[in-house]
Image: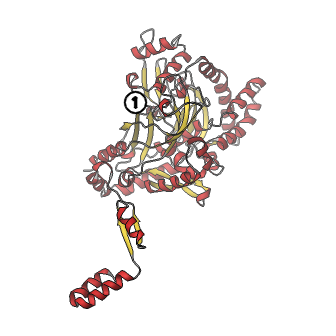
Amino acid sequence: MTQQTADQAAQADPAQGEQNAQALLAGPQSIVTVGVDLFADALVAQSVDVQRVDWRPPLGGTEAEVQKVLFDARRAEANATAISRVLATGAVLVDVRPASEALEMSPGMFFHAGPPITWERASGPLRGALMGAMLFEGLADSPEEAEKLLAAGQLRDGTPITLDSCHHHRAVGPMAGVISPGMWVFEIADPATGRSTFCSLNEGLGKVLRYGAYGPEVVDRLKWMSAVLGPLLQQAVQRRAGSSAGPIDIRSITAQMLQMGDEGHNRNRAGTMMLIRELIPELLELGAPANDVADVVRFCNGNDHFYLNLVMPACKLALDAGRDVPGSSLVVAMARNGTDFGIQVSGTGDQWFTGPAQIPDGLFLGDYGREDANPDIGDSAITETAGIGGFSMAAAPAIVAFVGGTAQLALSTTHRMYDITLAEHPIMQIPILGFRGAPTGIDVVSVVRTGILPQINTGMAGKVAGTGQVGAGLVNPPAECFVDAIKALAATIA
């Protein structure tokens, strides 16, 4: 008997109604509760079967905007179009080139990770990386001079110094993400459309430019990368691309590495090994000095993060395909500059929605602690935006040894990310979930409605310029990014 029929019986015959009510209370019961757990816990204590519904109001008081976007007649088709373009994008390694050529950069131009920012608001690691880039380019003789020129906004000869977001130039960069004209970059292309994206070469871990270090060892390494590593990789990559085997398929390697224990952001060991396996035959047949070839192989193979700088532009390439679809609530970029965390959404063009970058929770190197860490920084969250990295932690339980947490956390995180995404990737699959596709395509509406924020695993840079890496951990974007985005999306609806 249902509660409704019991109530009707009580109105017709009070005595019968009382008996029915007692029978209802004595029989099996299941009660649905919404909101705080106090009432539900009290019922459970009385052996009542409770079905808990995890509901909460939309973030930031956006009920009206959520409703407006949900009932936008364009939304379903727009999201289907945007995410289908993302999932269909291929990614092959076609070249390695100097940034001056690939990105049309000239002296005094510097690209950086995250939304646009000025020197005055730049974080310690971003300032350190820019100072190191000035030294590497020969535009300053000391860190002090580099800092002075950057603060003044011009080179010695009066040439203006310009800072801009990597994302504005079809590029991405990990951590500080600084790219200067003399650095070399990978070029990743979509075979179907010919579109391409770029990323710097990975330096390794510890005291490196992208973590804000700028000492002599950092500059010397960058000079070797431009004089030896870049040119040899260029020859090997071009040789491979022009062979019968064709260019190296980055999307295929990334899919394989998810099945080998990598997640594509902070764990790229299998991806790096597969890449080097493809490059070694080409390097050996170049006729280059044996010691240079050995140094290149040793450097790449000894840096488990080397493949990250190929995953990132491949992810950007895919997400750029989903841009500029009117009515779409797909997130096409998440990026941090060490001060601001910013997102971009397909249906709102190139507009950035920003909030304060957060300090990750995780594991620290040596004697470093939370007080030494800078807020979240880097373009590498493009991996999570594309469904790997923190979204695919279930594929790489060993990642918790690097960023903290437990294997169960890695599994539950991936399960949670399905609640805020539009699709499951047909190529990027997670073995422990029965080869279920990775949760792909962050939906602004779902984030705001559920309050579930995207999970990112990341490295941590020291907040003082010149420090380098201090740890690695887990972090979420600030909620206001998504609140502002859905308001802007609602404003596009007539």
Q: How many marks?
A: 1
Residue at the disc numbered 1: 116
Q: Residue furthest left?
A: 11
Q: Position of residue 165 (x, y in %)?
A: 44, 30
Quadrant in which residue 478 is drawn: top left
Q: Position of residue 342 (x, y in %)?
A: 40, 38
Neighbour class for label 1 at 10 Å: few (<14), some, many (≥20)?
some
Foreground residue among 322 and 118 = 118
Q: Residue furthest top?
A: 157
Q: Is residue 4 left or right of residue 238?
A: left
Which residue is located at x 48 percent, y 53 percent? 417
Does residue 6 appear in this view?
yes
Q: Is residue 109 left or right of residue 277?
A: left
Q: Position of residue 469 (x, y in %)?
A: 56, 30
Q: Is residue 366 left or right of residue 293?
A: left
- Above or below for 342 versus 57: above
Foreground residue among 403 and 341 = 403
Circle 1: element type: loop
The quarter of the image holding the N terminus is bottom left
Which residue is located at x 44 percent, y 31 percent? 338
Which residue is located at x 45 percent, y 55 percent? 422
Foreground residue among 304 and 9 = 9
Looking at the picture, which amino acid does disc 1 mark? Pro
